[in-house]
Amino acid sequence: MNVFGVFDHRYRGFRVVEIAGLCVLLALALVVYLAKTHAGGERADITRIQAQIADEHVRIALLRAEVAELERPERLGALAHYLGLQPIAAAQEIGPDELANVAHAAPAKTSPPSDAAPTDSAAPLHAPATVAAAPKAAPPHAATTTPATDAAASIDQLADAAIAQAPRAPQR
Amino acid sequence: MSPIDIPLNPIPQGWRWLTGRIWGIERAFGRAHEEGRAEDDTRLRIFFVLALFALAFLALAAGAARSALFSDGDRADAAGAPPGDRADLVDRNGRLLAVDLPHFGLYFDPKENWNPDEVRRVLPAVVPELSIERLDKALKADRRQYLVGGLTPAERDRIDDLGLPGLSFEPEPKRVYVLGPTAGHLIGFVDRGGIGISGAELGLDKQIRANAGKGPVALSIDLRVQAVLQDEVQQAAETFRAQGAAGIVTDVHTGEILAMTSYPAFDPSKLGEVPVADMTNHVTSTVYEPGSVMKVFTLAMGIDSGLVDINTVMDTTTPLVIGSQNIRDDEHSATNLHIWEVFTHSSNVGAARLGLRAGPDRLEHYFRAFGLYQAAPSELIESARPLVARKLTDNTVASMSFGQAISVTPLAVATGMNAVMNGGVYVPLTIRKLGPGEVPQGRRVISEATSRTMLDLMRMNATMGTGKAADAAAPGYRLGGKTGTAQKAVNGHYASGQRVSSFAAVFPTDGAMSDPRYFVFILLDNPQPTKDTAGFAMAAQTAAPAAGRVVERIAPILGIRRGPATPPVVVAHNAKTAR
């Protein structure tokens, strides 16, 4: 078959090759149009998302600055002073090895059951401070026969109770 | 002759291929014409042109799609960057110190407004900082005018809500110092153009600007340590009604400045409300005579050079007379003192005799090595040069040995002290947080053995000498220290009743030489006695307890554990056997 025969074949008076060429041309124009339209939509989305990212960055920067401002030492110091808080003195410190001694020195009758949650709402908050302030005195909530690990566990329970009673921050 | 036969020399291979193909097609057209198939010739040409167009369209479509989809890649990266021209400043734990926040400048275009009276009536009420003169000028102008800058987003919204035509906003980043006066002198500030003017903002200006959009610049300070130091220095200054005060905490091994404060403090975000004098960083920019703190360097020189050891006996029973200068001790000693007693008794006579024994050349050599003859090297550009006599006479040598006739900055004292306490290596101080394991290069100035002895002497002075108040305030942290109470020089003369009290502390003094160790220095300018100090305002009553309280509070932060309070082994042994 002669390759030039392609140019002779006609459909309703028009050469097929010309119709095919026109179709290809139109298809290409359509593809380019669709690509540009789609790209334009994508670009608008990208621009919008970029603007959102920029806004979020600004908001993050503002929030970080606000947090830093709220946590600045000068302000926290004033709050601590208002609450009557003070740095821990040397006499209030106790090592992990001494926890057992503190527990042994405490009276048995005030020992809370190890599997029971504290019932006095004020006690959990005050108990650690009492232990820290007078390590050699008998803390009212410590057990005389509680080993060190149990003492640590009870401290965890007290901390959990304190956290449970603390007001929760609003969730965003 | 075909195009490929044209003698172009050299002919690229690609060009030869292309011209060959074109010439081949042209010859095909020619052959078709010669063979009487003219219609094939025309069709072939049409097909060829169509094919070329199709290829061109394909190329254009691909290029357009690529351009449309991928040309904004760089912009996406830029959008991910935080706002501002300068990187955030954070402390060594990432706590924010300074940040660029979006602010807005307000502009007015009179061409867009037909009711200037309304603008003049309404706008000043919402923007109190707006100058009326500037507004009037803008209302009468013929082009867009700048009214006021530094508006917060909330202020911008309030103005926008007025709905006044002609008003517009332009974003302009503004540096915000969120901590107020905390570490104000160290952080410094920038001008309206965002260029560093003082402190870290100036010293690290290039790095801060280069890091904009990439990440924060971490300073060496620990905000918790800074807060403690600033609190205690302020309390001491107010208690003793000092004219000024300074404090610094350093890591003796790395030279990192963990805290630095100058009293009165100032808030970099309120520059217009602060007296210029309050902006002076007394740690870096004020020189003073260190007094007996200098004896640390004098004894380090004497011991390191082999002139004396801690048991060498010095003649301290009689005053030292050099020309018209009569050097004597505050507390006269009836017996001669060992070198360690010269230190714990803070004997001027003993230190002066040691300086004279060393001679001017050796003394200058060591004092230069300790960095006392130059501005303390650090990123802080405001570091001031010392005042030192050009030629050392016996008079100046004796005076310098106990801290007179030489004026240096607390920064220089701290740098030299670090060398004495870290094993004998002089390391410049830095406000830049060093990376993990990064150890700065230094130069050896004294031996490790001398450094060990000086640590013991410092500890001994805190347990037996003039630094007991500091040790009492920080029990169990094995603190060592040296007091310094110098007469204050005013207009070239020593002012009667005026003094500068300082205390140089190091902790812990025990352990291996490479163990973590920190230096604390507190200075009070002209402190006044209180009823609790029985009329005294020496360093032992003023700066020493403040330094002890600082150690007591920052040691847990720095991971130093409290231990049994024991005297230094070497000195305790020598103290028993010396006499």
Image (spheres, coloured by chain):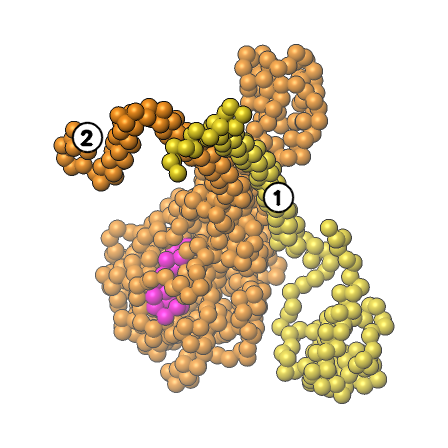
Q: Is residue B312 magenta?
A: no
Above or below — where is B529 with respect to B60? below
Colour orange maps to chain: B
Identity of the residue drawn at 56% across and 51% down: B96
Magenta includes B417?
A: yes
Spot the residue most to the right. A119
Q: Position of residue B119 (x, y in %)?
A: 67, 17
Q: Main secondary structure of the magenta part?
A: helix
In the image, what residue type sits under mark 1? Glu
Q: Which residues are magenta?
A: B410-429
Q: Position of residue B401 (x, y in %)?
A: 33, 62
Screen quadrant of the C terminus of chain B: bottom left
- The answer to whether residue B365 is above or below residue A117 is above
| Residue topped by disc 1 | A56
Which label sits on residue B420? none
Callout 2: residue from which chain?
Answer: B
Which residue is at the front of the view, B489 or B231? Answer: B231
Q: What is the x, y in percent for residue B368?
A: 29, 58
User: In this view of the protein, which residue sits in the foreground, B26 or B498?
Assistant: B26
How many angstroms separate mark 2 from mark 1 (CA)?
Answer: 67 Å
Tell me the kind of residue under disc 2.
Ser
Q: Is residue B262 visible?
A: no
Q: In which image quadrant can residue B359 be found?
A: bottom left
Residue found at x 60% / y 38%: A45
Q: Chain of mark 1?
A: A
Colour in which chain A is drawn = yellow
* Residue at the spot of label 2: B2
Residue B577 in the figure: left or right of residue B244? left
